[in-house]
Structures are given as C-alpha cells and as structure tokens.
Image: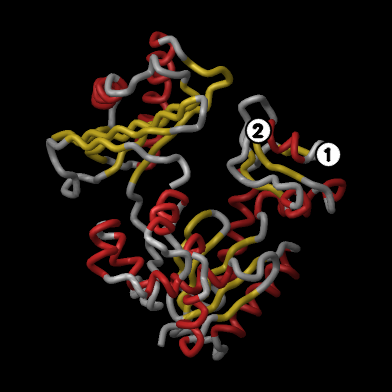
C-alpha cells in the first residue's frame, strides 16, 4: 500500500508577508496588484472572513473588506521560501511532485526515516512552523486523489488522514464539487444527472459517464471508488509556455487589440527562449469585460519559437474571435505540444467557461 502525503501551505503569499512585516499580522491582507484592474493573488485568512478570495478583482475585494491591506507580490521571496520548504521535504523522501510554488505531493512509501506517513506529515508541519514560522496543512492517504482532498479538509494548519478502511464511506459523503477535476461547469452537468455526492457518482455506470464526459468519465468513475494509480512524479516535464496581459482599459478597437497582441507575442518569444521550450500548438485566450472567455488553438507543421513563427498564427486565431461584440479585458498566448506529440495540420477550436 502506497503512502502519499499532500502538503499545502496556508495562504502562502499572504502568510509570508505577514511573517516578514509585523504590522500586517492579524490584519486582512491581499497580495496582488492594487489598481482598477488588479486581481487578488492570495488573501489572508483574516481577509477570507469577509469573502475575499484569490482571482477576485481587487475592486470587489476592497468593497467586501474596506480595511483590506494590499501588498504587491514578491515572487523572488516566495520562491526562496518555497525552496526552503522543499528542503524540509527532502529530509524524508526524494519522490516529490510540486504542483505549484506552495503545494506538493510526497511519496513516502520507501522512506528511510523509519517513520510512518502520519508521523512524517506531522514532522514536516512542525519543521515548517518552527524553522520558517509558517503553517501548512497536510493530507495523508494511499493515493494522490484522496491525499489532496484530505489536505483541504482541516485547513488552515490542520492534518487529515483517509485510510483504506474508511475511504469508501468518506467518498460517499463527499460533495461532487470537492472532487479533483470537477469544476463549476462539470458540477452543473452532474447536478442535472442527479449526482451531488460521491455515493451518487458511484451509482452511475461507466458507459454513462464516458458518454457525457468522455475520457474524464473514466477518472470520475475511478475516483468514486477511491482508485487513483497515478504515481508521484518527481520530474515533471514542462508541457507549455505562455503569458497573458490584463489591460488597464478594456479594448474594443481592432488596431489597439493587434498592438497588444504583438507585444504579447514578443513576451512569449522571450519566455520560450529562456525555457528552451519548443512546441507545435499555439493557443489564444481572450477574456471579455464580463469575464466570459474563449480559446482558439492551432497546430502547425513546424515548431513555434520566433516572432515570425507565432505572430501570423496568432493573428489568424484572433480573426476567429468576434472582437467587435464586446470589449476585451485580457489576451493570453501559450505554446504547447512538443514536436512528436502534436496533431499536425489540424485546427482545434473550443469555447471554455473561465472557471472550468
């Protein structure tokens, strides 16, 4: 039986700011850009009591919490602290899969520490508290799906264990929105099917789930039964490189949109060069003033790495977007599909809800 731990730092950016700036301790804090188009990156738990959360506009956050203190992001400092957290992880295992700067999976099945998974999770949380003066929540289970859910179960500064004996009962009562990979649109579709929790999901046949959700239906079917065989991957292969820009004023003139698209292409080319990433698929993301969002993608025969490679494709994709219908808030571009993985010569189009 595998022993998997998921560690999630509590309100990471905001907690680092409160640790390093005593005047912020105990106060509602939001990390992000303090401007009319600013977005909350992380909110302290004091701010969350007022309904402030990540991805919320800073304007709305201030309306909910007039006493909110906004702090600009300091990613270099957050990365440094994240590396210190990683050093604590490595005392117990080398099988570590970072999901982001503030969370990771650890496979401690073969740990040479002589400790059990629960003891290791407790030791890691204690070291983070004593050495870094921060808090982290931990989930312990026998697979990644359950470990990640468990880490969120007693946040902040908590730990929860889901063992094999009690997993089925735990999953049965789990709201469908808590399932990994189920966003608002998927949850809404499941509600139409009469699925509101893990028990009801378990009662749904595999054929029905795959008919409605495609390959994701297999994942949901397995998750409902506590099955997740994915390994903790200590080396993660970069799958895409991208960048995006939120504008101070919504764009509605095509000339202004094209100018901004050009600047984003230049930024993307620089990021591709820095990461040495080469891909065959370009994806354009457009978010309108009302926060609705669409994406358009194209896969080419060669690789996308220079301005001359990317700009014509980006313009072609933009031509598929009805930019005249409503003002544009954000434009993003990303390159994916390394050579050999791309579906060459095929155009792919999609419309996505920005939350799912």
Query: Number of marks in the image?
Result: 2
User: Does residue 111 show up?
Assistant: yes
Q: Which residue is mark 2?
A: 33
In the image, taking residue 346 as reference, residue 112 lies left or right, namely right
Residue 60: image x %, image y %? 68, 34
Q: Quadrant of the N terminus?
A: bottom left
Viewer-nearest residue: 339 or 328: 328
Nearest to the observer: residue 15 or residue 21: 15
> Is the residue 151 above or below the residue 342 in the image?
below
| Residue 95 appears in view | no
Q: Is residue 340 above or below residue 280?
A: below
Give the labeled residue for mark 1: 67
Residues under numbered marks 2 and 1 in contact, where contact means CB atoms less than 8 Å apart:
no
Q: Residue at x 29, y 42 (%)?
A: 336
Q: Residue at x 29, y 63 (%)?
A: 209
The residue lying at 55 percent from left, 61 percent from top is 103
* Above or below 162: residue 198: above
Q: Secondary structure at mark 1?
A: loop
Q: Nearer the viewer, residue 273 or 311?
A: 311
On the image, the x and y values in percent for residue 35 come to 67, 26
Query: Residue 281 at x, y = what percent?
Result: 25, 38
Give me the residue at 39% from left, 37% from top: 242
């Amino acid at each position: 039986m595998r022993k998997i731990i998921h560690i999630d730092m509590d309100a990471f950016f905001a907690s680092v700011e409160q640790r390093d700036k005593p005047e912020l301790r105990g106060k509602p804090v939001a990390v992000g850009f303090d401007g009319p188009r600013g977005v909350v990156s992380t909110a302290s738990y004091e701010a969350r009591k007022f309904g402030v959360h990540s991805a919320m506009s800073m304007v709305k956050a201030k309306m909910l919490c007039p006493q909110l203190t906004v702090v600009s992001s300091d990613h270099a400092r957050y990365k440094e602290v994240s590396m210190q957290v990683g050093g604590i992880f490595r005392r117990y295992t080398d099988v570590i899969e970072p999901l982001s700067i503030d969370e990771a999976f650890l496979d401690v099945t073969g740990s040479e520490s002589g400790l059990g998974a629960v003891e290791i999770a407790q030791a890691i949380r204690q070291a983070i508290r004593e050495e870094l003066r921060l808090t982290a929540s931990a989930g312990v289970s026998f697979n990644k799906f359950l470990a990640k859910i468990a880490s969120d179960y007693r946040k902040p500064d908590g730990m929860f264990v889901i063992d094999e004996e009690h997993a089925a009962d735990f999953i049965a009562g789990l709201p469908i929105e808590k399932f990994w990979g189920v966003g608002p649109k998927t949850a809404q579709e499941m509600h139409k099917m009469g699925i509101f929790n893990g028990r009801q999901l378990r009662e749904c046949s595999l054929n029905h789930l795959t008919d409605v959700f495609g390959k994701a239906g297999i994942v949901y079917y397995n998750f409902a039964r506590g099955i997740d065989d994915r390994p903790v991957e200590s080396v993660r292969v970069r799958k895409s490189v991208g960048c995006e820009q939120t504008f101070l004023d919504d764009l509605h003139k095509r000339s202004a949109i094209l100018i901004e698209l050009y600047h984003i292409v230049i930024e993307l080319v620089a990021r591709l060069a820095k990461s040495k990433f080469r891909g065959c698929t370009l994806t354009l993301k457009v978010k309108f003033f009302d926060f609705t969002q669409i994406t358009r993608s194209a896969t080419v025969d060669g690789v996308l790495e220079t301005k001359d490679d990317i700009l014509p494709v980006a313009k072609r994709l933009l031509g598929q977007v009805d930019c005249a219908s409503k003002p544009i808030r954000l434009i993003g571009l990303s390159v994916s599909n390394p050579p050999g993985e791309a579906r060459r010569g095929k155009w792919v189009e999609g419309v996505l809800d920005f939350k799912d």
